[in-house]
Image (cartoon, rainbow, N blue to C red):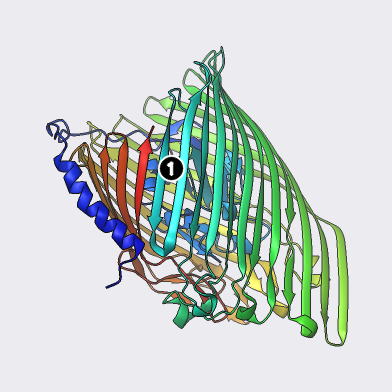
Amino acid sequence: MRRTPLSRALLIVAHCIPSLALAQNVNDSAERDAPAVLPVLNVTASKQGTTRFDTPNGVSIIDSGPLETYRYENMGDIAVRTPNTYLTAYAPSTPQLTIRGLGFSDDESDSTSTSTFIDGIPVTGMALGQPFDLEQVEILRGPQSTLYGQGSMGGVVALRSRDPGFEAGGHLQLDYGSYQRQRVEVAGDLPLSDRTTVRVVAGGEESDGYTENARLNNEGADWRSGFGRIKLLHIDDNDGEWRLGLHHFQSRGGNDYFTAQSLASHHQSDNTTPGRNDIEYTLVSGEYRRKLDNDRNLVVLLGGSQSNWNYWMPDSALGAKNGFDAKTRQFSAESRLSGVAGDFDWLVGGYASHLEREAPYLYDMGPAFVSSTTADVTGNTAAGFGELGWHLQPEWRIAAALRAEHNRREMGWTSLQAGDGFSQQQRLDNLEVRDTVVLPRLTLEYQPDDRHYSWLTLARGYKASGFNVYATDADSASQSYAPEYGNYAELGYRLRDAKGVWEVEGNVFYTRLRDQQVVLIGDQNQSLTDNAGKSHNAGVELSATLRPWDSVELQAFAAWVEAEYDEYATGGIDYAGTQFPNAPRNSQGISARWEPSDHWSLGLSAVRQAQSFLYPDSHHTNDAFTLIDANVGYRFDNWAVGLYGKNLSDETYFTRALSDTFVAGAPRTVGISLSMDF
C-alpha cells in the first residue's frame, strides 16, 4: 500500500507520543478527578452583560477549545453542529447560515435574516471564510430586532476575537490534513506598558480541495488564503477599556463544486473549467467600555468593513460565463448607556449605519445570448433603543424594551439583454424604499436562586424592505418588496446543581411571520424576491452539560423545528404546509471531552441532522446524515501535538442544488497539528 505524506506523519506521531508520555512524571490524579465547576460564559451579544445561564434567549456559545481542537474551517462547520442551525452554500468557504429555518435565501436577496458581527462591527457573513484566533462564537437564536434592528429576524452570530495579553508571549500552530491542506498561524502578545498591549496574528492556508476531477488534474476546487489581525487594548486612567482592531482575510480558489448528483455524492466532477470563488474582507473595529459612577456603564462602538465576493461558475457547468464580482461596504456607530437604580435597571442607546453595495451579474453565452445587470444600492439607518427592567420581587424581573428605526435605501440599476438579432438596454435611477418601524420586546424572568432561571420573551421581528437587484427587466427591477415582520414568543428554563457540576436547559418558541421574503426564479431565470402571505416556525430546544470531574465534560442537545409556509403559492404550486428548504426538522448531538492526565486530551462528538429540502426549491431532498468527529492531543511543556478527524463515517450530504446540479458538503477529513507556545 502506498503511504501518503499524511499517513506517514500520522504513523510517526502515533509512535512518538507514547514514548513521550512514558518519559513524563504522572501527577496525582486526585485533584483531577474531583468534581469541577462549569465555566461561566459571558454573552457579549446580549448587550447587557449577561452570562449564558441568565440570558433570556436560546443561545449557543462555541469557545476557543473546540474551534481549535476540531479545526472547524468555516461557519458552516459550526452551523451543522449546533441546535436548529444549518446552512446553505454555493461553496464551502461561503456558507449562509439558517437559524430555526430562516435565512435560506439571504445570499440572493437585498435583505438578510441573520446578522454577523466581528467584535461588534457588522460584516457580510458569506465573506468570513475561515475563522481565526477567536475567543468564542455566539449564536443567538430567534428574532433580535429590538437590539439589532433589520437583518436579525433569524438570529445573530457574534464572533469575538482574542484580547491582547499583558504578558509577552506567542503561539505557533502548523496543520497538515486531507487533500493537501496546509495551514500556519502565529499569534503574539506585545505589552507596550502596564496599561497598553498589542496582539498580532498572521497566517495562511492552502488546499487542493476535495473535488476529484481528472480533466482539471484535481485542481478545480483548490484554495489559498491569508489572514491577519492587529488588536490593541489600552486601559486609561479611569479604567476605561479601549479596543482597536484591524482584521483582514482573503481566499483565492477554484469553484468546481456544482455537478450532477451522481458525481457530487462522490465529490467528483466532470467540468472542463474550474470557475472562481474568491472572498475577502477588511474590517476596522473600535470599542470603548467604561464603568461610571452610580452603577452606570458606557459602551461605544465604531467601525466599518469592506467585503468582496468574486463568484464565477465553471463555464462548462451551464455552457456560459456566469457569475459576479460583488462588493459591500458598511460603516456603523453605536453608543449605549446602562445603569441600576434601586429595583430598576435601564439601557438606552443609539445606532447609525451607512451601506454601499455593488451587485452585478453576468450570463454570457457569446453571440447567442448575453444578460448583464448591475445594481448599486446605498442604505442609511438610524435607530434609538432602550430597555427598562423592574425587579418587582427579588426573584422576579420584568423588562420592557423598544427600538425605533428608520431605514432608507436607494438603487441604481442597468440591464443589457442581447443575442442574435436583438439587443435591449434599460436603466433605472434613484429607486427608493423607506421603512420606519417600532420594535417592542417584553421579557419576564424568574430566578429564585443561583440554580434556577426561567424566562418568557415576547418580541417583534423585522426584516427590511429591499430591491430585486438581480432582475433582468425594468418592470421587475422597479418593484420593491415589502418588509417582513414576525411576532415571536419564547419560553425557557435552565437548571444547574448547587455545585455547578451539571446544567440542563429547555425552551419552546413560536414565530408568526407575515409577508415573509422568499426568493423565487421568475421569467428568464431571474432571481426575484416576493412576499409570502403567512408562515411560521415553532420548535423545542433541549441541552445538557455535565462535568463530573475536572477531566471529563459531557454535552448533549436535541432540537426540533417546524418551519412551514401557511399561505404561499407560486408557479401554480401551493407550498402551504411545506417545510422551508435547508431547515432539518430535527437535530441531535452528543460530545465528550476527557483529559486523563495533564498531558493527554481526547474528544468525540456526533451530530445527526434530519432530512431537508435543498434551496432554492422544495423538490430536491437532502437525506438525513450523521457527522462523527474526534480528536486526541498530547502536550509536553510548551509543545502540543494533535490528531483530528471530521465526518469520520464519510457521510454524504448536500448544501445547495441548482437545476440538476448539486454542491456536496465536506467529506471525511483528518489532520495533524503541531503547536508551540513561546
Could one spot residue 383 in this view of the protein? no
Front residue of 333/629: it is 629
- Foreground pick, 649 / 113: 649
Give the structural element (helix, strand or loop) at label 1: strand
Tell me which residue sits at (22%, 31%) in the image. Answer: 499
Residue 85 point in image, percent of width and height: 45, 56
What x and y, as percent, mark residue 622? 43, 73
Query: Which residue is labeled 1 in the image?
Result: 456
Residue occupying image coordinates x 51% and y 38%: 201
Quarter of the picture containing the C terminus is top left
Task: Tell me which residue sits at (47%, 57%) in the image.
Answer: 76
Front residue (pair 339, 439): 339
In the rendered image, is residue 640 in sight? yes
Where is 397 relative to 460, above or below? above
Q: Vertically, is 246 above or below 629?
A: above
Location of the N terminus (image quadrant): bottom left
556 relative position to 245: left or right = left
Q: Residue at x 47, y 37 (%)?
A: 187
In the image, what residue type sits under mark 1? Leu
Q: Does 499 sit above or below residue 530?
A: above
Q: Determine whether, in the image, residue 58 is placed left or right of residue 331.
A: left
Q: Nearer the viewer, residue 552 or 612?
A: 552
Q: Quadrant of residue 240?
A: top right
> Looking at the picture, how far across and down is residue 541, in whole percent?
37, 53
